[in-house]
Image (tube, rainbow, N blue to C red):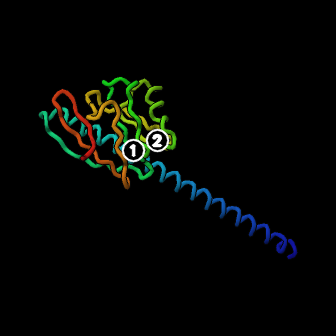
Amino acid sequence: MRAQIFAQPFIIIFSLIVAVSVLIFGFKAILDLREKSDYVQLLDAQSELKEVIRTFYTFAAGSEKTITLRVPKKISCFCFLDKDEPINDIPQVPSSCTENDPESLRNTIKTDGGQYHLYVTPSKLYTITKFTLLSHIKTQTGSLLCLPAINGKVNIKVTSQGSYVSISSQS
């Protein structure tokens, strides 16, 4: 009888430790799942954009469409690099896309040698934030075009130019 009285607090403490461990593990699993779903949403947006560019490349020159990509709300900008322009002429990146470091994106592009078409900021948000789309895209504003993501949406104007597809802002 006395042994049962001494064992009961240990059983309660052990049960509490197990319950707290399950809650912590469940909370961490939910956070990881949410982060992975945001990353999948980014990859879906990139795939959709790639498909639209591929489609418009085959259209007659002058065909255009404004698309709205849904992206994770943590994304601040989609920046497109025109690989035909010299990477030394990259203009100043808008302050809304710079991650508190105005030279961060420019240095990343120069370090990569300009091999990617799409840079997503903030760059430390996901494992991969640089993407190659298709070789036949150009920006209408020079070597770099950064479009802001507002409330999880990026508006992009895609125009067929015959031998390439032009990317520009919606306005």
Asked if marks 2 and 1 touch (Cβ < 8 Å), the reply is: no
Task: Describe the element under mark 2 as helix, strand or loop.
Answer: loop
Real-space Cα distance between discs 2 and 1?
A: 9 Å
Dot 2: within a 10 Å radius of its alpha carbon, few (fewer than 14), some, or many (20 or more) residues? Answer: some
- The residue type indicated by label 2 comes to Thr
Dot 1: within a 10 Å radius of its alpha carbon, few (fewer than 14), some, or many (20 or more) residues? Answer: many
Check the image and report above or below for 45 versus 20.
above
Check the image and report above or below for 6 versus 20.
below
Point out residue 164 in the picture as x, y percentages from the top left corner. 21, 29
Q: Nearer the viewer, residue 140 or 160?
A: 140
Point out residue 134 in the picture as x, y percentages from the top left corner. 29, 30
Task: Describe the element under mark 1 as helix, strand or loop.
Answer: strand
Check the image and report above or below for 17 versus 169.
below
* Residue that badge 1 annotates: 77
Point out residue 129 in the picture as x, y percentages from the top left corner. 44, 38
* Residue that badge 2 annotates: 98
Residue 95 got which mark? none
Sequence order check, earlier mark of 2 and 1: 1
Point out residue 9 in the picture as x, y percentages from the top left corner. 79, 70
- The residue type indicated by label 1 comes to Cys
Residue located at (34% from left, 43% from top): 147
Residue located at (47% from left, 26% from top): 111
Q: Nearer the viewer, residue 82 or 16?
A: 82
Q: Nearer the viewer, residue 86 or 38?
A: 86
- Name the quadrant of the N terminus: bottom right
Q: Nearer the viewer, mark 2 or mark 1?
A: 2
Residue located at (14% from left, 39% from top): 63
Q: Nearer the viewer, residue 119 or 128?
A: 119
